[in-house]
Amino acid sequence: MTETVLVIGSGGREHVLSWKLSKSPKVSQVYVAPGNAGTCQDKKVENADLNVKDFNAVVKFCDDRKVSLVVVGPEDPLAAGIADTLQQHGICCFGPSAAAAQIEASKSFSKKFMERHNIPTARFQTFTCPEAATKHIKSATYKALVIKASGLSAGKGVVVAQNRDQACQAVTDILV
């Protein structure tokens, strides 16, 4: 019996995943939602016009096409709980639960997790108030100041500040 697979995402990662899955003799069809211009170049791969933020629509798509496995590339739908929803509907999903995805989705969660489990990590403070963060930066006794936005930011939520003024500006940019 061959499998039908849905790959969620639109980047290079999903392109490679869909291409590799299409090479398996155990896979008859690969859908990619939403996909990109490169993902549909293989005869076994088809882009799907599907709103992946609408988990009910994803479940219906899987049911209608007898999708036996969903592979999720991007972090956003994982953090929002797509794997949980699919598994609740009996659809196999390669991806962590929303709770497990927090290790990637929340910098604050991951740093506190590392601290709680004695995993070596750089010193950190978390702030929701820009004034408190700026006050901390100005009084910090260590040289390296790295400002990170908590939450998903596609790998672009980090500023390695060259000085305290730059660190304070990063806080303003992120929190204000």
Image (cartoon, rainbow, N blue to C red):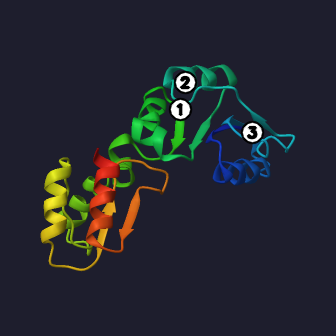
Q: Nearer the viewer, residue 134 or 72?
A: 134
| Residue 57 left/right relative to 121 | right
Q: Which of marks 2 and 3 is nearer the N terminus?
A: 3
For disc 3, the marked residue is 2
Amino acid marked by disc 1: Ile
Quadrant containing the C terminus is top left
Secondary element at tag 2: helix
Amino acid marked by disc 3: Thr
Dot in front, 1 or 3: 1
Instruction: Give how far apart the Cα atoms at labels 2 and 1 are.
Output: 8 Å
Look at the numbered discs 1 and 3 and tell me whether their residues touch, using CB distance below 8 Å: no
* x, y percent for residue 32: 69, 37
Instruction: Report how many numbered discs are placed on residues in the image.
Output: 3
For disc 2, the marked residue is 59
Residue at horizontal 80 percent and vertical 52 percent from the top:
23
Quadrant containing the N terminus is top right
Amino acid marked by disc 2: Val
* x, y percent for residue 75: 48, 46
Q: Which of 166 and 54 is in front in this view?
A: 166
Instruction: Give how far apart the Cα atoms at labels 2 and 3 are.
Output: 20 Å
Q: Quadrant of residue 121?
A: bottom left
Secondary element at tag 3: loop
For disc 1, the marked residue is 91
Instruction: Give how far apart the Cα atoms at labels 1 and 3 are.
Output: 16 Å
| Residue 166 left/right relative to 157 | left
